[in-house]
Image: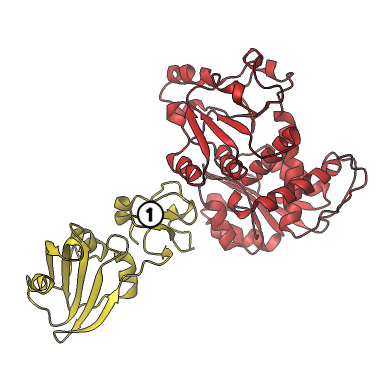
Amino acid sequence: MKGLITMDDLTNDDIHSILADAERLLPVARGETYLPLLQGKILGNLFFEPSTRTRMSFETAMKRLGGDVVNLGDVKTSSVVKGETLFDTIQMVDGYTDIIAMRHPRQGAARYAQDAARVPILNGGDGAGHHPTQTMLDLFTIQQSHGTLEGLTVILAGDLRYGRTVHSLSHALVRFGCRLIFASPELLRMPAEIVEDLREHGADVMETEDLLGNINQADVVYMTRIQKERFADEDEYAKVAGAYKLHARDLDNTKSEMIILHPLPRVDEIHPSVDSTRHARYFEQAFNGVVARMALLCRLLNIEVPAEIAGGDA
Amino acid sequence: MADEHNMRRVTAIKNGTVIDHIPSGQALKVLELLSLSGDTSVPVSLVMNVPSKKMGSKDIIKVEDRELTQSELDRLALVAPDSSIAIIRAYSVAEKLNVNLGKEVRNVVRCTFSNCITQNPREPLPHRLVVTKTDPLMLRCYYCQRPQNLDELIINLI
């Protein structure tokens, strides 16, 4: 494996082994133990569009492991605004760094960058395409809560058309025999080619507009934000988006071990009343971004994570 | 016999290329693909919807004084992957060629997805479409992985 562009770059064994590395790295991610496995290594953070969690968690992951980070900075003041091609930008950063984390508004940009680069590329989101490092932290959080990735019923809700996190995650979940329920407004359905792909791989997929009517079957509910700008007018948005909001009172009859995830930022699709229920896992999920990315950085830089880490209570 | 008769529907050519076994109705697209539909100085003959033992019916194109190159054959694969090509020299078949689509179509056509990274014409890496199925033909962009609409592809020829 050179870089991580889509989940197809990882086998199920790779996924299990990276998640096991992540588990052992938890005390390092929490700052309880210092383990400079990546000392002397430099990560290039190339974010061509805004990112808070992904960029910061890559940076934290690198620094917790003793490595360093260089940032592209604001695209508006970088050479990109002067018309530099992605190819040329990558040639430059490739020479400065040992590994690159990248987010780009255009789909396919990460694979393009990987073909242009000598160092590994970690895809931090390419248009509406893929976001595999998010998927790894999602899988980590699911495994942490359920003890397994196998055979779960997972509802993916909200904007399934443009939400790249749900595209990568559904591909991964199908490989572990999960049953998927896609709950979204008609306008924001999962792209047909993805549903077709998943079914070709033997997936049990159901598409519905009804989130709350199906929520009691779920082991995992993965919420996403519905953006106003996807709709022709505000009334239409308000009418549709209301059906994809969770309140604590909606969770009375759900499975007790059901967890709610969200890639964040949320707007109002998860009411604050949900935060204090036993189902809420989205803030742990955001923290897990650090530990999952630590494990991925080590894997792609061919640095072995020790079998035992001092101070580890995992 | 039927095939020989079909071949003679238009005059035999002295030098050039005969493209046979084009799926019925696709000949105009083939001309477009080979940039023979607009200004061209070479004579082109076309027969459409003639009976064929192998295909039921088919189209045939004869291009005088021009021998198709490998990269032109690659283009042809997009609409007529099973066509057969004969290079004619001095009224005789000098070479027989088959269209071979291969696993990937490289630098023949641009991805049709408007938000693909390859839409920036200054990006230098090759345009790559991966063949995911041959019958019916299905292609995906190597970079953005979007499935391609074959009708739109024709207007994205490089």
Q: From what the image shows, is residue A291 above or below residue A277?
A: below
Is A56 on the left-hand or right-hand side of A112? right
Residue A200 screen position, x and y as percent: 47, 46
Q: Secondary structure at mark 1?
A: strand
Task: Say which residue appears at 28% left-offset and 66% top-offset.
Answer: B82
Q: From what the image shows, is residue A215 above or below residue B86?
A: above
Residue type, label 1: Met
Is A39 on the left-hand or right-hand side of B57? right
- Residue A53 location, quadrant: top right
- Residue B61 location, quadrant: bottom left
Q: Chain of mark 1?
A: B
Name the one closer to the observer, A200 or A161: A200
- Residue A268 location, quadrant: top right
- Which residue, given by chain and number where applicable, does mark 1 sit on? B138
Q: Which chain is red?
A: A
Residue A141 screen position, x and y as percent: 72, 36
